[in-house]
Amino acid sequence: MPPLSSSPEQPQPLRAVLAATKGWVERLGSVWVSGQLIELKRRSGGVTHFLTLRDPLAEVSVQVTASTQVLDAAGPIAEGMEVVALVRPTVWSRNGSLSFECSDLRASGEGRLLAAIEQRKRMLQAEGLFDRQLKKPLPFLPAAIGLITGQDSAAERDVLEVATDRWPGVRFVTRYAVMQGQGCVEQVRDALAALDREASVDVIVIARGGGSVQDLLPFSDESLVRAVFACRTPVVSAIGHEPDTPILDLVADVRAATPTDAAKRVVPDAADERQRVRQAGTRVRDAMLRLLDREAHGLQAMRSRPVLADPTGALDVHATQLRDLRARATRAAAARVREEAGWVSHTISRVRALSPQATLQRGYAILSGSDGAAVESIAAVAEGDDLLAMIADGTLHARVTHVQRRKETDG
């Protein structure tokens, strides 16, 4: 396409310039480009989405449009990943802005690795390997700590020094393994199985001092992740890599940011524990003093009550009442005895007055025949009969010499 001719007297219309620019740009056609995905804007319900790609070696970034179908076919991608995209540059006729339409998008380099890790992570998550409810708690003070790390590594030194400073009596059972590259997965897995069989090991720490995505790739291996999940002993992941979290961090019972952080998590700080004991002792002592003070005030309040201030006061009142009752009872009993004695005396007098003995003492006698029957009439005796006469002080034997009937009187 020949260049446009123009002059101040014969300028080109803006539409012509834009059309020519659009034609020049679109002659490039589709081209594969590599870059870092620094922004991804998915429009909910939309068919076109916006991405921003940046050249990591230069301050150059462009906006790219992609359809939902292209993004779905790209698999799991996220901001920060390295990608390659098949784009076609174009110019918008309305505003003259340059844009790139993406027809194919793929993760590349570390991005491809991260995409594969992300896909594996989603599969394991769906199986429940990351469930928080299945996480095993760490012991307060383990009898022994299993440590899997590289021999003479900085991670080993950090864990041992920090843990020993915090709790001098801590004991480690260390198993060395290659912590990156070929053989790493197998050696870490074997060390994990050996430590899990150790009865004295209460927690296992897998420690490494961080690294690139490629260096940490073994710690996202599916077989190693499943071995950690099947472990009966709590496992602490201390890979020390923040930007890209390996899957081991997700399946472990506890994730530590660094090996130093792992050492702080698996053993308590003796100084802190002593301080807590002192604080607990102070709280217990203060609580006991408050309790004793409260009980002393309660006891003092009880002692100030009349019944406790003069414990015998109530007894004195009852003793006085008892004496009064005894006096009244004595008087009543004496009066009743006198009354009953008078009645008995009167009754005795009446009995005595009616007694035959009293009659005899007045000079009367009781006559009876020889058969003992009382003589009640002169008709019962005859002259010459022997009679017994009972008088007050004895008995007389008499014989009837004469019987005289008493004369009846008039009126």
Image: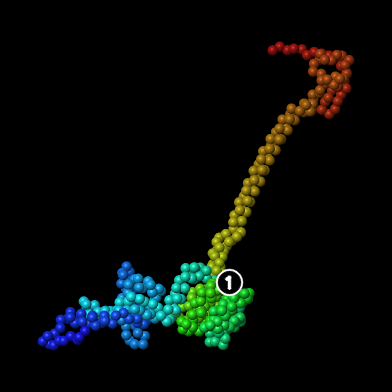
Quadrant housing residue 228? bottom right
Q: Quadrant of the N terminus?
A: bottom left
181 vs 410, left or right, is left
Q: Position of residue 336 (x, y in %)?
A: 66, 40
Above or below, 310 against 353 in this view is below
Depth check: give the residue in front, 207 or 406.
207
Crowd tier of the residue under label 1, counting other residues whose Cα lies within 10 Å: few below 14, some 14–19, many 20 or above = few
Quadrant housing residue 186? bottom right
Residue at (57, 80) in percent of width and height: 187
Q: Where is residue 346 in the image (x, y as percent from the top left)?
A: 70, 33
Residue at (22, 77) in percent of width and height: 93
Is there any visible trace of residue 44 in the rendered image? yes
- Name, please, the residue furthest toward the left: 9
Q: Position of residue 177 (x, y in %)?
A: 57, 82
Q: Mark 1 points at which residue?
A: 232
Is there any visible trace of residue 267 in the rendered image? no
Quadrant housing residue 44? bottom left
